[in-house]
Amino acid sequence: MSCPRPRIILEFWYPSDMEILRELHSRGLFDVAFAPDLPFGTANADSLLAAWMARSSGIPALAAVSLGGRSAAASVSRIATAHISGLDGVVLVAGDSRQCTDALGVLDALRLASSLPGTPEAAAAAKLPGMSAPLRAALRERPCFVRGAAVDLGSERSVRLARAKAEAGANLFLSQLLPDPSAAVGALNALSSLGVPVALGIPYAPTEEARARLSSLLGMSAPSPPEVLRSLEGVPRELRSSIYVSPIGGRRSNLADFLESLSSLVA
């Protein structure tokens, strides 16, 4: 199942973001919402529920599925649930060295996501009388199911592994947040032959407080929004065909202006 390239992917964290998500999407300022799998007990720490909230508002939505903090069976269940519930896809996050010994590997997870029902034959079976509603939903033909995988553009090993991820079924890569996107041109060139869109991760940190939080959380320098846009201009246009925006902090008032400026930079 091929998927259209998302020009702008917008991350959201809280149920209170729904109103502004609807407004921004109605203005065409982003294509897909992304719900990360938060490690703390917020009201929408479950990425599937958060993504479903966006999808039920008519906004295409992706949900993160963490492969490091859950058993393989739980990861399989969440990937299948995302498909059955009508989400537009998943982004698989592999976890770190402390992950469970039975954690589902990212390549296995991609193969699983690629094998989910959605063929014309399955869609025909879904129309048979007596089919239960959940099974009917699971079998219906899907024009697209995003199988996203993370890529660290600063790691040669991660960039090399991207080929195996593409062969296993990845049809979208999301990079880490980049304080200086122009520094990733070499890695982007190396990935361009795979034919898989790479969504460049950029932070939106409009206040000093947000930038301090970003520095504290990720241990990275925290650029202002204008600095991020200037750095993006240093990336060849054909390599900035997809952008993943992560708003930092609670302020969203100027996000629309930022997305409007960003849209003109995306190929």
Image (tube, rainbow, N blue to C red):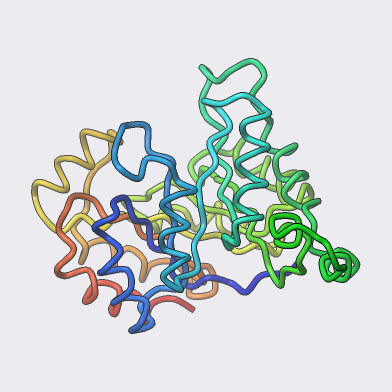
Residue 219 placement, left or right of 131: left
Q: Residue furthest right?
A: 121
Residue sitting at 58 percent across and 63 percent down?
88
* Quarter location, residue 139: bottom right
* Quarter location, residue 110: top right
For the residue pair 170 and 47, the one nearer the viewer reads as 47
Q: Is residue 97 above or below residue 36?
A: above
Residue sitting at 56 percent across and 57 percent down?
188
Residue 92 placement, left or right of 249: right
What quarter of the picture does the N terminus occupy? Answer: bottom right
Residue sitting at 54 percent across and 54 percent down?
186
Residue 61 percent coordinates (x, y)? 49, 62
Q: How many labels, in total?
A: 0
Residue 105 percent coordinates (x, y)? 68, 31
Residue 34 percent coordinates (x, y)? 44, 57
For the residue pair 128 and 93, the one nearer the viewer reads as 128
Residue 234 percent coordinates (x, y)? 38, 67
For the residue pair 224 and 26, the one nearer the viewer reads as 26
Residue sitting at 32 percent across and 32 percent down?
40
* Quarter location, residue 8: bottom left
Q: Residue furthest left?
A: 208
